[in-house]
Amino acid sequence: MRRRDFFSFGAAAAGAVALGAMSPAASGAQDVATAHTARKSKVVTPDGVTLRVRDWGMGKPIVFLSGWGLPSDFWQYNFADLMDAGVHCISYDRRGHGRSDDPGTGYDYDTLARDLGAVLDQLDLRDVTLVAYSMSGGEAVRYLGTEGRARVSRVVFLSSTAPCLMLSDTNTMGVPGAMLEGAKAMMAQDFPKWLKDGEGAFWLSAVSEGMQEWGRELMLQTSLPALLKCYDSMIHADLRDELKALDLPVLVIHGDKDASAPLPLSGARIAELVPGASLRVYAGAPHGLPITHRKQFNADLLAFVRG
């Protein structure tokens, strides 16, 4: 498999409702508007980093963790559908991504897990479903293992890079380290070119040229130090023991055409490691599955949350 095929891409709140002058009969709508305007748009982490938050809709809370190099904007197409289905959708820009602070440090999974904890705590979210996309599977697993699960009731691993990407004596299904480090060297040299070269495998021509350009623009918002340090965290992580210790409902969703995190190395292994996990494989789906197979994914997510 070509180097770029393994990591081809990774890769404002809903707004107050302008109601104007309200009659007493419209007080219910006014209460909803007040609930929206009172929500936080920022969270400050224990080490003083400000994270920008998207907090849309009402109902059961689902926190969407973004993939490698992607800001929370990536989820807006999913949110538009899920809000109408009565779901409370939350996401945030990881440090160094999108509109969050870029401190130049803290891109290890331990710190990123504490950042997730700060979001859940400061928004006081409970009975949460975590959707961990791509590299953020490591954030979710580390959070559950170190911060506890008082606020989280279930997890979806979506096109996840977990559990252990790099080949070693104890991980014979991994990718050779030289291959992964070679990809990193190309990113450091010319990330826009690397991104452009790999987008075909990320989307598999399932979206328009405009959507592909939008995806590139999202990733180009992320600082290069954040990209490279997060990449290091992702490729060096070994989450196998932590996954075995999970004791909550887990759904694994993965495409069988995922070149960034091939199914046999990632999603299928997560399902084997987590006790009682369910695996759902999408035929023909690439790493960009949340967009390319949005309707199917949203439906499966809703069924999991409500079930």
Image (cartoon, rainbow, N blue to C red):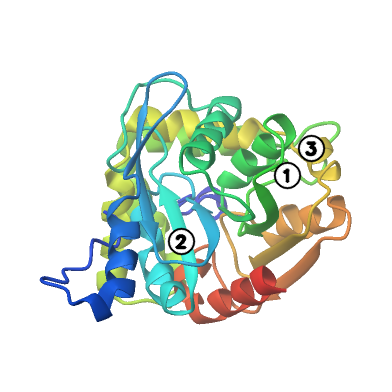
Q: Going by the image, does 149 lie left or right of 102? A: right
Tell me where residue 80 sits by quadrant: bottom left
Q: Which residue is mark 2?
A: 89
Answer whether residue 173 is visible to the viewer in this image.
Answer: yes
Q: Residue at x 72, y 72 (%)?
A: 280
> Percent position (x, y) of residue 153?
70, 54
Q: Going by the image, does 151 lie left or right of 244? A: left
Kind of residue at disc 3: Glu
Marks 3 and 2: CB-CB under 8 Å? no
Instruction: Give 61 or 107, whichever is nearer the viewer.
Output: 61
Q: Residue at x 83, y 36 (%)?
A: 241
The Cα–Cα distance between marks 2 and 1, rounded to whole angstroms, is: 26 Å
Q: Going by the image, does 160 lie left or right of 118? A: right
Kind of residue at disc 1: Pro
> Percent position (x, y) of residue 154?
70, 56
Instruction: Give 92 or 61, whichever is nearer the viewer.
Output: 61
> Percent position (x, y) of residue 163?
73, 44
The Cα–Cα distance between marks 1 and 3, rounded to whole angstroms, is: 9 Å
Q: Residues within 10 Å of mark 3 (few under 14, many from 20)?
A: some
Q: Which residue is mark 1?
A: 163
Label ID, residue 143: none
The Cα–Cα distance between marks 3 and 2, rounded to whole angstroms, is: 26 Å
Q: Please identify, in this view, whether the residue under mark 3 or under mark 2 is nearer the observer.
A: 2
